[in-house]
Image: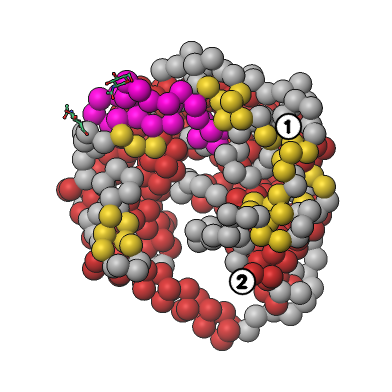
């Protein structure tokens, strides 16, 4: 699941979702407090480790305890952590971080970066922190704050615009922030890469009054959707010049996942029904061709013949999305199935084969993905059912 801006959507959705049943055992205030403190400690363990050993580089390598620039060399982890600092009520560190970023971060740098990662982490991180720092009702309003993060986000997004200059409107996967698209940049991008930009760019347009950001990302989504198959499925990889699918496996996980997510959330956030109509068609097709209750498979986007009977870890956002859409019953069953994989291994491997019911060879790893816990959270919000807490 991606995007800081998404938090706003969650709030909207929370009020839209109807609570189903209250059953099971609650958590006492004492237990809740202990769990909260444990989460806070875990965050500070990671955040302080980053600040001490890696800042201002992008990320901390946890074994060697040194920093590394993995994205653009713009203090990625600090920007990515802003909203969490605010959520924890840490005015001091939130204020210091905003001030440091405003003074030190620049995007006129000769770096080729991922359009997708830069949008969801950096543009999204800056915009959500901007909204938090500007608003008394968050309790985090900074008196000295003067829209610096909004200006940074706008400058960064401007530098990504050349990526959208393609015949299909679907952006290149990477762009150089100083020089535009590299001469030999790959013309192949993933569906998620082209379809996971609308929330951040749309919010940027609304905040700056410059419609171009919203337009290019909506155009990218239309470019993908226009090339859907006759049965309303999309593939995994597409050529942004010819519009041909170079990887035709349709699924709800790897390479496609947040295309679905952002269709619904863009509707929830902006009220733009074009996104809802696309989502409804896409969702109906996914439930018809990909859903083998309670699992999801990957099929050829044209023939709908199964190519991979595979659970992959990224699919775990889906029950949460279904909660936002109000489709709770299949979400409960799928979440239980995904959670059974978690219980079997203590985490969700990247790939779990549904034919052999074992880890897909070469896909053992778990890069700390948040999808399953996010779905768990949304299902709890919708049902108030504590069963997931006890793993039963
Ligand atoms: C950008 O960086 C590349 C190498 O990464 C270098 O060859 C090129 O000269 C640089 N261009 C500018 C304008 O700084
Ligand atoms: C792009 O590819 C061509 C042909 O392989 C090569 O001659 C050229 O140097 C490459 N350009 C860059 C910027 O790498």
Asked whether 188 or 192 is in front, the reply is: 188
Examine the rendering and report whether any part of residue 161 can be seen.
no
User: Which numbered dot is residue 300?
Assistant: 1
Apparent side of residue 30 relative to residue 161 in the rendered image (left or right): right
Examine the rendering and report whether any part of residue 303 can be seen.
yes
Asked which secondary structure carries label 2, the reply is loop
Apparent side of residue 251 relative to residue 42 in the rendered image (left or right): right
How many circles with numbers are drawn on the protein? 2
Counting from the top left corner in percent of width and height, residue 104 is at 18, 48
Counting from the top left corner in percent of width and height, residue 167 is at 48, 13
Magenta extent: 172-194
User: Which numbered dot is residue 346?
Assistant: 2
Q: Tell me the colour scheme of the image.
A: secondary structure
- The quarter of the image that holds ligand 1 is top left
The quadrant where residue 48 appears: bottom left
Counting from the top left corner in percent of width and height, residue 234 is at 66, 29
Q: Residue at x 22, y 56 (%)?
A: 56
Residue at the front extreme, as displayed: 361
Of the two numbered discs 2 and 1 on the same chain, state the one appearing first in sequence.
1
Label 1 Cα crowd, 10 Å radius (few <14 / some 14-19 / many 20+): many
Q: Residue at x 79, y 44 (%)?
A: 291
Apparent side of residue 325 relative to residue 78 in the rendered image (left or right): right
Asked whether 13 or 83 is in front, the reply is: 83
Counting from the top left corner in percent of width and height, residue 136 is at 37, 55
- The verdict on label 2 being within 8 Å of ligand 1 is no
The quadrant where residue 386 appears: bottom right
Q: Residue at x 42, y 26 (%)?
A: 186
Asked whether 203 or 356 is in front, the reply is: 356
């Amino acid at each position: 699941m991606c995007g800081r801006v998404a938090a706003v959507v969650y709030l909207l959705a929370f009020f839209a979702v109807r609570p189903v049943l209250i059953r099971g055992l609650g958590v006492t205030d004492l237990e809740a407090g202990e769990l909260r403190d444990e989460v806070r400690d875990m965050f500070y363990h990671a955040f302080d480790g980053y600040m001490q050993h890696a800042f201002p580089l992008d990320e901390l390598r946890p074994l060697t305890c040194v920093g590394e620039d993995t994205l653009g060399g713009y203090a990625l982890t600090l920007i990515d952590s802003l909203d969490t600092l605010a959520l924890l009520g840490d005015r001091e560190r939130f204020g210091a971080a905003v001030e440091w970023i405003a003074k030190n971060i620049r995007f006129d740098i000769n770096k080729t970066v991922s359009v997708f990662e830069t949008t969801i982490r950096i543009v999204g991180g800056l915009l959500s922190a901007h909204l938090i720092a500007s608003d008394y009702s968050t309790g985090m309003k900074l008196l000295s704050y003067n829209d610096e993060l909004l200006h940074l986000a706008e400058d960064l997004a401007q530098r990504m615009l050349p990526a959208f200059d393609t015949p299909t409107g679907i952006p290149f996967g990477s762009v150089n922030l100083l020089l535009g698209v590299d001469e030999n940049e790959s013309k192949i991008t993933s569906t998620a890469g082209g379809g996971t930009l609308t929330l951040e760019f749309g919010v940027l347009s609304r905040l700056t009054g410059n419609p171009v950001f919203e337009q290019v990302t909506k155009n990218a989504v239309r470019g993908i959707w226009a090339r859907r198959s006759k049965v309303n499925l999309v593939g995994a990889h597409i050529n942004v010049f010819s519009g041909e699918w170079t990887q035709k496996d349709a699924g709800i996980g790897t390479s496609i996942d947040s295309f679905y997510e952002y269709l619904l959330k863009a509707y929830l956030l902006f009220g733009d029904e074009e996104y809802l109509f696309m989502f409804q068609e896409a969702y109906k097709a996914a439930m018809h061709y990909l859903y083998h209750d309670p699992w999801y498979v990957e099929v050829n986007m044209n023939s709908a013949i199964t190519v991979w009977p595979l659970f992959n870890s990224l699919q775990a956002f889906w029950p949460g999305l279904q909660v936002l859409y109000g489709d709770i019953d299949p979400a409960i069953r799928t979440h239980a199935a995904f959670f059974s994989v978690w219980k079997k291994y203590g985490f969700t491997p990247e790939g779990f084969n549904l034919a052999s019911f074992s880890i897909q060879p070469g896909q053992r790893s778990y890069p700390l993905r948040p999808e399953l816990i996010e779905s768990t959270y949304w299902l709890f919000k919708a049902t108030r059912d504590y069963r997931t807490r006890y793993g039963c």
